[in-house]
Amino acid sequence: MTNHFSAILTACAGPVAIFTDFDGTLVEIAPRPDAIEVPDFLAGRLEALETALGGAFAIVTGRTIDNIDGFLSSHPFSVSGSHGAEQRHQGETRPASSGHATAAAKLSRILSDHFDGDERILVEPKPAGVAVHYRAAPERGGDVQAAMDHALKSATDFHAIGGKKVIEARPRGTDKGAAIATLMQNPPFRGRTPVFIGDDVTDEDGFRTVNAMDGVTVKVGPGPSAAKFRLPDIAAVYDLLETLAERTPEHGEDTRLKEARQ
Ligand SMILES: [Mg+2]
């Protein structure tokens, strides 16, 4: 197998903006989304990366910003939450639109009522969508899809997308690719090479967008992907982020790279 770790580092030789998914990329997936274990070192390592990149780091996730803050409470990272329906950058938050919030609340009620009585199915309301998790009852995937399709008949602005034992409704036009493209229009991201690391189906929008920007795309784990590179697991992602934080020119230690760009 090609040594993707080295190839990724080579592709990241210039100034980069780093975007990472959260579940399955920075933390191991758990049976329920609130049951993940976040390593003690993670927040500090991400903060070091953010500093090394002059702020050009953001988490791009299906989770809400509030939810991410619950796990990484020590620092207000830039987050594109709910698949880009809400964004926070440099402490400034752009919330989900009120129209989407109202429609999402209605969808949540319909789906909560439908799965009332099966505690293995978790209906998670979001500011601009709703996720139905069935990891604890994988045999009910077909039921979840059918219930979601039915609920969406009353919310034509929304569409469903499947992930790892989760089906999620979100506003049309909202995806991780659009979220990254929006961030890339502004400093400190603008002018840098975008790098996106993710593991799931919803990350493919991000991979396609970043590929179109001549960026660097990294899929974590097995499975088909539009990403150019692959890393085997989350431990390799940690190694990559740490290496990038240490070698990034802004960090002031790698003069060789600076000279190479002059
Ligand atoms: Mg993921």
Image (cartoon, rainbow, N blue to C red):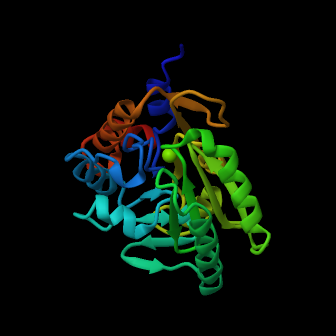
Q: Of residues 173 and 17, which is closer to you in this image?
A: 173
Q: Residue at x 44, y 25 (%)?
A: 6
Query: In the image, is 166 to the left or to the right of 8?
Result: right
Classify 237 as above or below 95.
Answer: above
Instruction: Look at 36% across and 43% down and name the residue there.
Output: 27
Residue 65 figure quarter: bottom left
- The answer to whether residue 212 of the structure is visible from this angle is no
Q: How far across and down, in percent of the image, does residue 10 sit?
A: 48, 31
Task: Give the residue furthest to the top.
Answer: 1
Q: Residue furthest bottom?
A: 98
Q: Position of residue 34 (x, y in %)?
A: 36, 55
Residue sitting nearer the eye, 39 or 3:
39
The percent coordinates of residue 95 (x first, y second) are: 51, 79
Q: Could you tell whether 157 is left or right of 1 in the image? A: right
Q: Residue furthest front?
A: 117
Could you tell me how many numbered marks the image carries? 0
Residue 193 in sight from this viewpoint: yes
40 sits left or right of 97 in the view: left
On-image quarter of the C terminus = top left
Tell which of 95 and 216 is nearer to you.
95
* Picture coordinates of residue 145, whole percent (x, y): 70, 52
* Residue drawn at x 30%, y 64% as measured from the top left: 70
Q: Residue at x 52, y 35 (%)?
A: 11
* Residue 37 shown left or right of residue 10 in the figure: left
